[in-house]
């Protein structure tokens, strides 16, 4: 049994849920033993409650949204149901009443045979170049 048809469907659900701003809906995509290396925190998150708290804090930002850069999306399939997705997205939210964009890179390990398919998620802001 698979809960999602593709790993990309999970990613698109993640984007939709981030934009909706409901931390419980976002956290529901993460497996109970998932590891989250979040974009806006120096701490690795390893518990379901920690995942929910992180996304609750992120969802409290005014104007929160995320956009995928579809041309940068890469998929590696380990099995029929286990996949790695990596790419670039941009988070947007207000800081001091100014809407800012935070280009970020991400990697997801997703098992579409699981009800909570995200096993691992690592995201970090794209560094500024030196030139």
Image (tube, rainbow, N blue to C red):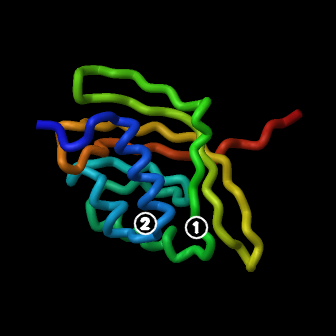
Number of disc labels: 2
Give the residue pinned by disc 1: 64
The residue located at (35%, 44%) in the rendering is 10
The part of the image, by quadrant, that contains residue 118 is top left
Q: In this view, does 118 lie above or below 24?
A: above
The residue located at (33%, 21%) in the rendering is 77
Label drawn at residue 54: 2
- In this view, the residue farthest toward the left is 1
Mark nearer the N terminus (2 vs 1): 2
- Across and down, in percent, residue 89 comes to 59, 45
- Across and down, in percent, residue 82 comes to 26, 29
The part of the image, by quadrant, that contains residue 131 is top right
What distance separates the C-alpha of mark 2 from that of mark 1? Answer: 14 Å
Q: Is residue 105 above or below residue 102?
A: above
Q: Nearer the viewer, mark 2 or mark 1?
A: 1
- Across and down, in percent, residue 98 comes to 77, 73
The part of the image, by quadrant, that contains residue 63 is bottom right
């Amino acid at each position: 049994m698979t809960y999602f048809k593709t790993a990309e469907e999970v990613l698109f659900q993640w984007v939709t849920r981030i934009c909706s701003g409901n931390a419980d809906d976002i956290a529901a995509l993460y497996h109970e033993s998932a590891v989250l290396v979040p974009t806006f925190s120096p701490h690795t998150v390893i518990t379901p409650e920690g995942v929910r708290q992180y996304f609750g804090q992120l969802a409290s930002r005014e104007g929160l949204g995320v956009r995928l850069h579809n041309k940068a999306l890469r998929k590696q399939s380990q099995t029929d149901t286990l996949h790695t997705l990596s790419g670039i997205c941009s988070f947007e939210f207000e800081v001091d009443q100014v809407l800012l964009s935070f280009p970020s890179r991400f990697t997801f390990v997703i098992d579409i045979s699981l009800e909570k398919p995200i096993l691992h998620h690592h995201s970090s802001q794209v560094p500024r170049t030196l030139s």
